Image (cartoon, helix red, strand yellow):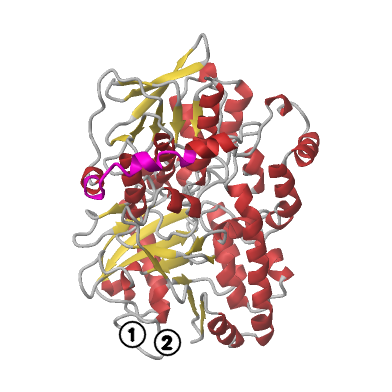
Amino acid sequence: MSPAARRLLLAGAARRRRFSTDAAASDSSRPSQQLPKGKRWDAVVIGGGHNGLVAAAYLARAGRSVAVLERRGVLGGAAVSESDLVPGFRFSRCSYLLSLLRPAILRDLELERHGLKLLPRSPSSFTPCLDGRYLLLGPDAELNCSEICKFSRKDAEAYPRYEEKLEQFCKLMDFVIDSAPPELRQEIHFSMVDRMKHRVEKSAFWGHLFRHVMQQGQANMVLLIDFCLLQSEVLKVTLATDAVIGAMAGVHTPGSGYVLLHHVMGETGGQRGVWAYVEGGMGSVSSAISKAALEAGVQIVTNAEVSQVMVNKTSGMVKGVALADGTVVHSPVVLSNATPYKTFVDLVPSSVLPEDFLCAIKAADYSSATTKINVAVDRLPQFQCCKDSNPEGGPEHMGTIHIGSESIEEIDLAYREAAGGISSKRPVIEMTIPSVLDKTISPPGQHVINLFVQYTPYKLSEGSWQDSNVRKAFAERCFSLIDEYAPGFSSSVVGYDMLTPPDLEREFGLTGGNIFHGAMGLDSLFLMRPAKGWSDYKTPVKGLYLCGSGAHPGGGVMGAPGRNAATIVLEDLMKAK
């Protein structure tokens, strides 16, 4: 980031303090539903997801007039809380944990002042076994040692080395995540080898990346764990789930090591790799960012579906957007928080895009194997491997509960079934119970349960996700699997909401149902995200930028694409003066 751009990003503190906290709170509780007629904005953001809101906030703090246009009636994109699914319960409908949100964004936008409250989890992981054993893991090194010793004393000795390896990777990645990849357009037609050589020699960003990151990321998860000499199957499975979460990939898939590394990059309260619940659900993250944006002067409009990015065909420059209701919003700068496919295939006229670029966008991997089931229950599940009953919540209820995968082979089998068009017969389930720590999201004595389920193909080889019987059968399959570990779970279910890959695409605009806006393999990251030659948030349409998870550094509720994109926009605006 250039010094000038940094000054612009940090500008606005004095201006911000002219707003009262009370006024900001009342204004941000219900974003404006109308745009001033005829106004020409400095920038327009398509999509009120967290990245779009972050980008808007930074641009407005630098003195730019910004409008955010959100298709749905609620802000947040996939970082959203919804209360009308089961009466009395509030669900984090898509994303459900926070760790990746960049510390700089938390500080710059003062998100705690705007109501963001994190609820750290300890222990952070619980893996029950059908043979009566279980494994707890968390930020407590002594707990980890004693728990792993139940399975392998050698693993207990090796585990700190595994954590140290991940810590080293995270420190190396900070610079890469918080930087916009430098692109040189004249390189587009160079060979990949020549491009790599030039970048490593000339750029601190790419030299840093390829010296320290790529070697670890290109490994598959099994090799990464075996490298650290871990032997216990239960421990390896517990760690391996982070390598396949959200991906149509198995633990043996090349590049799955990076997916795991991506999920341990974050922090909570300065502790690396620690994930937290958010009081009020993940919508509270988006709410806090929107309050910061509103305070900086951003205009936020919901129920405003963008139908087209308008481009001057003579100059090739963006000139605004058109809404589905016919409204035209004028701006020389448009940032899209939508997926690359949605942006360039559905919104931008194909005639203004280079053919090779459009082909690359269409050929990108948007496959998904993820289903999210939001469950309301009238009591906590009691796991039969735990001798003591904890109706109010015990250590086993605090963190992520790994269900249905006690061996690497089980995960791999579940993946192979989905690759053949069959939803996994024994799904890989990550269960979380945020209401154990967050008392604001469920009635007293009752609980909210998130089930992040894999593997479910977008298109079934037999049947359809539109068939209510197919949907019900799969939900019951998941509940029955949980019953094996926590008898009576099925009977505790009050109601549930299920989002399959087609549902995620239809309701949240996630192409293919992919929660990351595109695959997170090494052929889809860094200089290849979203397409070769366009990793710096710019696009072939002058004035149009990407600011969502389909841009570097990828998916998760981290805000880095939004912040980095705002940096590039501000630099370009300065150059244009």
Queried whether the magenta region covers residue 139, the answer comes back as no
Q: Where is residue 105? Give x, y as percent.
A: 46, 49
Instruction: Give the magenta range.
Output: 9-23
Say what amino acid the circle numbered 2 marks: Cys
Q: Which label sits on residue 390? A: 1
**How many marks are shown on the rendered structure?**
2
Say what amino acid the circle numbered 1 marks: Asn
Q: Are marks 2 and 1 in contact (CB under 8 Å)?
A: yes
- Left or right: 399 in relation to 237: left
- Left or right: 365 in relation to 76: right
Q: Residue at coordinates 31% horizontally, 56% vertically from top-left?
A: 115
Is any atom of residue 353 visible in this view? yes
Q: Where is residue 491? Give x, y as percent.
A: 27, 74
Q: Residue at coordinates 58% horizontally, 69% vertically from top-left?
A: 239
On the rendered image, what quadrant is the N terminus found in? Answer: top right
Among the 4 quarters of the image, the one containing residue 334:
top left
> Between 52 and 374, which is closer to the camera in this rendering?
52
**Mark nearer the viewer, 2 or 1:** 1
Q: Residue at coordinates 76% horizontally, 37% vertically from top-left?
A: 202
